[in-house]
Structures are given as structure tokens and as C-alpha cells.
Amino acid sequence: MRLKFYEENDEHLIEQYTITEEQLRYTMSPKASIELVKQDKNRHAILVLDKDKLVTFFVLHEKEGVKPYSSNEKAILMRAFSTDFYEQGKGYAKAALQLLPGFVSKHFPYIDELVLGVNQPNIAAQSLYKKCGFVDEGRLATGFRGVIKVMSYYMSKIDSEKLD
């Protein structure tokens, strides 16, 4: 399994990705996310591939994107995190989150904090993020579907040693 930046020639992978209305209650679709990425150089679409199949998708958002969630100028926001509906329950989301710190250390060496927002009712996602090292410090923000918990993963030297 590997993480890679989205490129134009990956469009066919986005077309094959299945995201349900239920999932869209909590996140943005990869297709809509990529439209925003094309308009904002501080947004980076990330594909999580198992062999050549897109199984998980998210966006890393630098600078202005982080500000509603963290005052740390060395933080990056993970947003629009989803797993293809037909690939859920196979451990891809957890594996992607475990690969994320090394990926960020390699491509964004100045980043020392990963930030995300998770809808308060989405207990399963909160539990997954905690298992992967994100901490809930009681910060709340307003998301596009209401109040969200802000969680952070603090990068360490160990993460930068995990580079592939």
C-alpha cells in the first residue's frame, strides 16, 4: 500500500471510487475535493493505493486551511478523508493513517503537527484516529455539518525515521 499525490492521469481512479450518501454526511467526495485542489495551491489531494486500486482518499491543506483548527503555523490539515465504500472494513483507513506521518515528513519536512476535524457523532472515526496517535484536546470548531472535534497528531523524530 502506498500514498501518492493526485495527478491528472489519475482521473480514472477517481471515476471508479464509490462514496455513498451516508459517507457524504461526514466528508466531501474526492471529485469535489479535486476541483478545490485545482483552485488552491495549498491543497494537495492524496491517493492511497493498494496495488493499482484507489482505496482511500484525503486532502492535505496547508496555511489558511489550517487556521480555523490550529494556530500552529507548522501544522497541516487533513480533510475529506474517506475510504471507497466497497473497501471499508479492510483496514485501509488505519493503514493510511499509519503511513501519513512518514509521508508528511518526507514531502512537508517543516510540518510538526497533523490536524483534522471529525464530526462529533462520528464515534467510529474518532476511535480510529485515537488508535493511530491523534489526540483530542477538547478543541471544537464549526464544520460544514455542525460542530466538529479537532484532533492533532504531533510529529516526532521517530516519524521522520519511518521514511521509505
Image (spheres, rainbow, N blue to C red):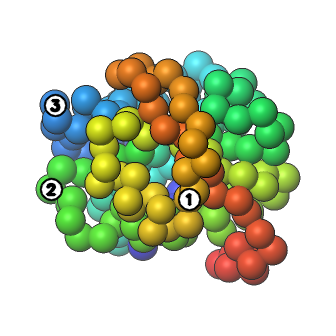
Precedes in sequence: disc 1 or disc 2:
2
Measure the alpha-carbon separation of dots 1 and 3.
26 Å
Amino acid type for the residue under numbered disc 2: Tyr
Precedes in sequence: disc 2 or disc 3:
3
Residue under label 2: 86
Return the mark for residue 76. none
Measure the alpha-carbon separation of dots 2 and 3.
14 Å
Q: Is residue 149 above or below residue 153?
A: above
Between tags 2 and 3, which lies in front?
A: 3
Precedes in sequence: disc 1 or disc 3:
3
Q: Is residue 9 above or below residue 37?
A: below
Residue placed at 81% from the left, 74% from the top? 157
Amino acid type for the residue under numbered disc 3: Glu
Return the mark for residue 21. 3
Residue 133: image quadrant is bottom right
Return the mark for residue 134. 1
Q: Position of residue 14 (x, y in %)?
A: 32, 41
Q: Position of residue 28 (x, y in %)?
A: 36, 30
Residue 80 visible from this viewpoint: no
- The crowd level at tag 1 (other Cα within 10 Å; few <14, some 14-19, many 20+) is many
Q: Position of residue 17 (x, y in %)?
A: 24, 45
Residue placed at 34% from the left, 66% from the top? 92
Measure the alpha-carbon separation of dots 1 and 2.
26 Å
Count the marks. Answer: 3
Secondary structure under the numbered disc 1 in the rendered image: loop
- Would you say the residues marked 1 and 3 are in contact, meaning their CB atoms lie under 8 Å apart? no
Amino acid type for the residue under numbered disc 1: Phe
- Would you say the residues marked 1 and 2 are in contact, meaning their CB atoms lie under 8 Å apart? no
- Would you say the residues marked 2 and 3 are in contact, meaning their CB atoms lie under 8 Å apart? no
Secondary structure under the numbered disc 2 in the rendered image: helix
